Amino acid sequence: MSRSAPLLQVASAVLLLLVSSCAATDHIVGANKGWNPGLNYTLWANNHTFYVADLISFRYQKTQYNVFEVNQTGYDNCTTEGATGNWSSGKDFILLDKAKRYYFICANGGCFSGMKVSVLVHPLPPPPKSSMTDHTSAAAPPPIRILGVIFGALLSACFGMD
Ligand SMILES: *[C@@H]1O[C@H](CO)[C@@H](O)[C@H](O)[C@H]1NC(C)=O
Ligand SMILES: *[C@@H]1O[C@H](CO)[C@@H](O)[C@H](O)[C@H]1NC(C)=O
Ligand SMILES: *[C@@H]1O[C@H](CO)[C@@H](O)[C@H](O)[C@H]1NC(C)=O
Ligand SMILES: *[C@@H]1O[C@H](CO)[C@@H](O)[C@H](O)[C@H]1NC(C)=O
Ligand SMILES: *[C@@H]1O[C@H](CO)[C@@H](O)[C@H](O)[C@H]1NC(C)=O
């Protein structure tokens, strides 16, 4: 067995942990209060950071409420003209696949009772700069050096992902 095998095992375990912590976040609107009247979703949104590939999910009574993706006019005025999407399953997962501001409202009058949320989706952090020239990595044996580079990349990719 190679001398570096135990270290590689530990490193692989850490790698797995890092990968799972990098998974896209599902932002549950209103957290345990869900999508309901009388809440201020601006406060909820201000408490979250959204990145491309994250999900936003709405939990609500499907017989009473729904979700429409609208533009700023629709958000400001509680109108659904030109809506680009609508959901009504009661448990809707919506992929935030673009770096832009999204607007969601409830039709059926819910919007006028505060059921509107706007979220700014940030681009993913830029790819990490090459760490190949890093002195400590370069001095380590090749397998360790490669792991170091992977760790560096993952850490950069994960930075601020929460
Ligand atoms: C929600 O909170 C924000 C931030 O404090 C505030 O500007 C806004 O007026 C509130 N909205 C309502 C409907 O109370
Ligand atoms: C903001 O996040 C903190 C920590 O998760 C939580 O305790 C607090 O209730 C949140 N506030 C709002 C308005 O969601
Ligand atoms: C809201 O609607 C009014 C007219 O109904 C319009 O003048 C106004 O521009 C709309 N708001 C936005 C942000 O466009
Ligand atoms: C939103 O969509 C409506 C209907 O298509 C349009 O009249 C309005 O100008 C749009 N508002 C914005 C801010 O793009
Ligand atoms: C909801 O979305 C579907 C397409 O997914 C569309 O056919 C329908 O017209 C939309 N409903 C409203 C009220 O905009």
Image: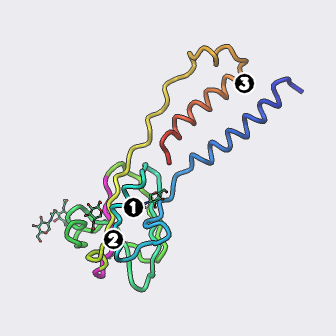
State the residue in front, 127 or 64.
64
Residue 124 at what x, y percent from top left?
A: 44, 42
Q: Quarter-wise, where is residue 48 in the image?
A: bottom left
Three-letter amino acid code at disc 2?
Answer: Phe
- The structure residue drawn at horizontal position 36% and vertical position 55%, both measured from the top left corner, is 46
Dot 1 or dot 3: first in sequence order is: 1
Q: Gap in Å between the C-alphas at discs 1 and 2?
A: 18 Å
Dot 1 corresponds to which residue? Answer: 44
Tag 1: Cα neighbours inside 10 Å, few (<14), some, or many (≥20)? Answer: some
Above-or-below relation of 124 to 119: above
- The structure residue drawn at horizontal position 43% and vertical position 65%, both measured from the top left corner, is 29
- The structure residue drawn at horizontal position 45% and vertical position 77%, both measured from the top left corner, is 60
Q: In the rendering, which numbered label is found on residue 68?
A: 2
Q: Gap in Å between the C-alphas at discs 2 and 3?
A: 50 Å
Residue 72 at what x, y percent from top left?
A: 23, 61
- The structure residue drawn at horizontal position 50% and vertical position 39%, both measured from the top left corner, is 159
